[in-house]
Image (cartoon, rainbow, N blue to C red):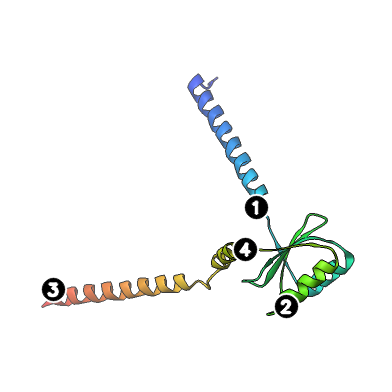
């Protein structure tokens, strides 16, 4: 019978402990992040009339409202241009806690939105240009060597 040595046991125990710490740290980080589900304005109206909304946070730069429902769900609703005053009045009439993001926080969220992969297209164009240039140089060198 082959029995693992003490060093191997210690190493395996250490690896198991490290793996357990990593998974607990990852789950703790995931618990802090809030995931907002996108929702239509008609669903927002239904929830407002039913009294399911507990808290609303407006982001006027992006024209969105982050809603916290009484059951603990988080919802994101986008509203049309110049619609914030009407939405805010409806929420206040139903006695919902309403707040507005500061300009710095709104700008930060605006910067974090995807930019239609513009950088990918630029990088792809550069890579394609480099391939064409290298291919041209290799072709010229090959022709010079023949002569």
Q: CA distance from mark 3 to mark 2?
A: 71 Å
User: Badge 4 is on which residue?
Assistant: 102
Q: Secondary structure at mark 2?
A: loop
Q: CA distance from mark 4 to mark 3?
A: 67 Å
Instruction: Return the disc, 4 or 3, that comes first in the chain's sequence.
Output: 4
Q: CA distance from mark 4 to mark 1?
A: 20 Å
Q: Secondary structure at mark 3?
A: helix
Instruction: Return the disc, 3 or 2, that comes first in the chain's sequence.
Output: 2
User: Badge 1 is on which residue?
Assistant: 33
| Front one among 88 and 120 | 88
Q: Nearer the viewer, mark 1 or mark 3?
A: 1
Asked which quadrant contains residue 42, the reply is: bottom right
Would you call the spot at circle 4 few (<14 residues within 10 Å), some (14-19), or many (20 or more)? few
Q: Secondary structure at mark 4?
A: loop
Q: Residue at x 67, y 48 (%)?
A: 31
User: Badge 2 is on which residue?
Assistant: 83
């Amino acid at each position: 019978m082959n029995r693992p040595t003490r060093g191997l046991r210690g190493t395996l125990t250490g690896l198991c402990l490290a793996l357990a710490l990593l998974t607990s740290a990852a789950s703790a980080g995931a618990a802090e992040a809030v995931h907002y589900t996108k929702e239509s304005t008609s669903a927002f109206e239904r929830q407002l009339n039913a009294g399911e909304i507990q808290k609303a946070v407006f982001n006027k730069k992006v024209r969105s409202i982050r809603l916290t429902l009484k059951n603990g769900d988080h919802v994101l609703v986008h509203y049309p241009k110049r619609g914030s005053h009407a939405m805010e009045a409806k929420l206040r009439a139903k006695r919902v806690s309403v707040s507005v993001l500061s300009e710095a926080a709104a700008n930060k969220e605006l910067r974090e939105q995807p930019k239609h992969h513009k950088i990918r297209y630029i990088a792809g164009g550069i890579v394609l240009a480099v391939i064409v240039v290298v291919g041209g140089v290799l072709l010229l060198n090959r022709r010079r060597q023949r002569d």
